[in-house]
Image: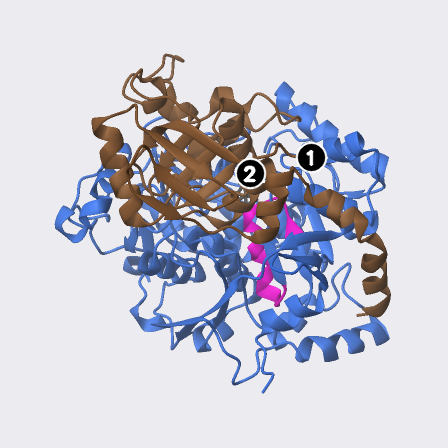
Chain colours: A brown, B blue
Amino acid sequence: MPIEKFTTLISECVPLPIENVDTDQIIPARFLKATTREGFGENLFRDWRYDKTGKPKEDFVLNSDRYSGEILVAGKNFGSGSSREHAAWALKDYGFKIVASSYFADIFKSNSLNTGLLPVQVSESFLARLFELLDTDPSIKVKVDLENQLISILPDGPQENFEINTYKKNCLLNGYDDIDYLLSIKAKISDWEKRMVI
Amino acid sequence: MDSKTIFDKIWDRHIVVNIPEGPSALYIDRHFIHEVTSPQAFGGLKERGISVFRPEKTVATPDHNVPTINQHLTIHEELSRVQVDKLTENCRDHNITLYGLNNPFNGIVHVIGPELGITQPGMTIVCGDSHTSTHGAFGSVAFGIGTSEVEMVLASQCVLQSKPKKMRINIDGDLQRGVASKDIILYIISQISTGGATGYFVEYAGSAIRSLSMESRMTICNMSIEMGARGGLIAPDEVTFEYIKGREFAPKGEQWDQKLEFWKSLPSDPDAAFDKELFFRAGDIEPMITYGTNPGMGTGISGKIPSLQEIDNASRNSFNKSLEYMGFSPGEAMEGKKVDYVFVGSCTNGRIEDLRIFASFVKGKRKADNLTVWIVPGSRQVERQAEKEGIRKILEEAGFEMRQPGCSACLAMNEDKIPEGKYAVSTSNRNFEGRQGPGARTMLASPLTAAATAITGRVTDPRTFL
Ligand code: SF4
């Protein structure tokens, strides 16, 4: 299925200044029992967001009135742990389109890209500055321009280029999907099988 | 010139197409699937109206969600049952071999692949599960993938991947008594942190690694992902060949000789270059235990939780949050801490060797009264072997019971959950918040440390008994 096209986004941000946020926090294992991709947003950050009785925990950022937006800004090494793509689905389903952090776990990064959630890796200093600004003014906006690989804090805050694999960038800009590509090279795959006997 | 690492040798020969400035289409020799990360991939095939390209290269087993008692009965919990049934249905519709719950080969995906001889050197192996790195112990390129990638493999037997960088971790010298391979890997992660190998594929080398059994090597490769690595592998040698020979799906006769020749060509060339190389001395490693909520937060068992001054300013918040969750304070000693549960099992330490170590330690002793202990074999074959060797009997005489195979309390998707606020010493691989149940507090350790702890009821250095 084609993924959603992504070009430029301007949005407010939700800060989560915690390091090493693992996929068990993003979506705990007990909520992985669905057999479709929908509905995971409800349990995003479940155990940080709700207490045992299901009551929202006031001090968790997703429950605060101060912050909203389509960009999650997280501490370094975001998405470590399990390979569950459900983590990316949950973030997307909740309404995030971008996660910005200074460091992402590998599998999380590729899962996000395959889901159409854009991981934007920024420098430590950019991240620290963004957290600082968000702390004083929750209404500041950030612009992410995929074509130019540029993230900027609006209106005149710092800006920075970010890296993304050219192939993946084109997939996102055009809404292409890897499986369509792989299906298009099936003849080459069969040739490879014939060549490799061991 | 043209020197290659084992990783290069395997990776390069599996490239079907290189996309300019993009990833490569990498051919996958073996694909494992389980009930949790595969249903949406099959759903995707259905929406596209396509079938599985090479069904004979995929093997399925339900493991994550399964109960560890009364497996002959229908699964009690509805959502788990639906997922397991869905796997059965998908395998039937697409002609995929399934080792279902009552099959003699059922078990945790990373335990059964090797024990059936499906896992072999030189292969590319993937599974929608991050601990696929376990199979790297055989000198294969094995890594975890997400569900979209599972769909890619089902559709085309390939995944699109960018080549990671290469790291070699050398561990030389002799291990102290009472130190196991679990301690080696917990030690390495504690030294380089959970993000220390992000972006790399790791080769483990050195005399300490060479001296390990196949099962111990699997424990090390298993936890590669816990330092962020894409995967980890160990060059195959006589230990590897000996292990594979004669297993269900191992090559036989003339084919064996051909494969053997190929396998022997795999080890890294002597002058092959790595992007990063690390060195550790085996003798520096003590039995390890974790005190925090990621596997990098570990210490030698006689050591202490770091004091606040030892933690970077930027990381203090996360450190405090983690200790608060664990109910620990900076600077405290780990030995002697109260424990409520012990879990022995998982794809890290749920193999027969692990049960042997646990059983030989507790033999003739008694389980501590204050503890609940779950001993969960990694597979049916492990369970049968434990029976055959009299391990079940030894365990029972010491007051322990052995359950039926599955992932169990490693991720607590079934009923085996550590209750809120309780402390568990676990031989599994992750001590994340809530990993073993909402509010559960996990300390990771080796089967030997778990055994010593199960006898005293407190975090115990196994060396005090040796
Ligand atoms: S035992 Fe634990 S880590 Fe291993 S596959 Fe099962 S859930 Fe994953």
Which residue is label 2 attached to?
Answer: A84
Q: Residue at x 55, y 31 (%)?
A: A89
Looking at the picture, how far across and down is residue B282, in whole percent? 36, 71
Residue B139 lies within the magenta run: yes
Asked whether residue B260 appears in the rendered view, the answer is yes
Task: Indicate yes or no: mark 2 CB to ligand 1 under 8 Å.
Answer: no
Residue type beneath disc 2? Arg
Residue type beneath disc 1? Pro
Which residue is label 1 attached to?
Answer: A2
Give the structural element (helix, strand or loop) at label 1: loop
Give the left or right position of residue B53, taking residue B122 as reference.
Answer: right
**Which corner quadrant of the figure contains ligand 1?**
top right
Q: Height in image: B361 above or below B60?
A: below
* Disc 2 packing (10 Å; few <14; some 14–19; many ≥20): many
* Disc 1 packing (10 Å; few <14; some 14–19; many ≥20): some
Q: Quadrant of residue B1?
A: bottom right
* Residue lying at the far front of the rendered structure: A156
Q: Residue at x 68, y 32 (%)?
A: B40
Q: Nearer the viewer, residue B70 or B32?
A: B32
Residue under disc 2 on the same chain as residue under disc 1 = yes
Looking at the picture, how far across and down is residue B299, in whole percent? 28, 54
State how many labels appear.
2
Give the left or right position of residue B322, taking residue B212 as reference.
Answer: left
* Residue lying at the far bottom of the rendered structure: B1
Q: Height in image: B72 above or below B264?
A: above
- Return the chain for callout 1: A
In this picture, which residue range is highlighted in magenta? B126-140
Calculate the distance from the C-alpha at mark 2 to the C-alpha at mark 1.
20 Å
The earlier-in-sequence mark between 2 and 1 is 1
Q: What's the magenta bit mostly, secondary-structure-wise?
A: helix
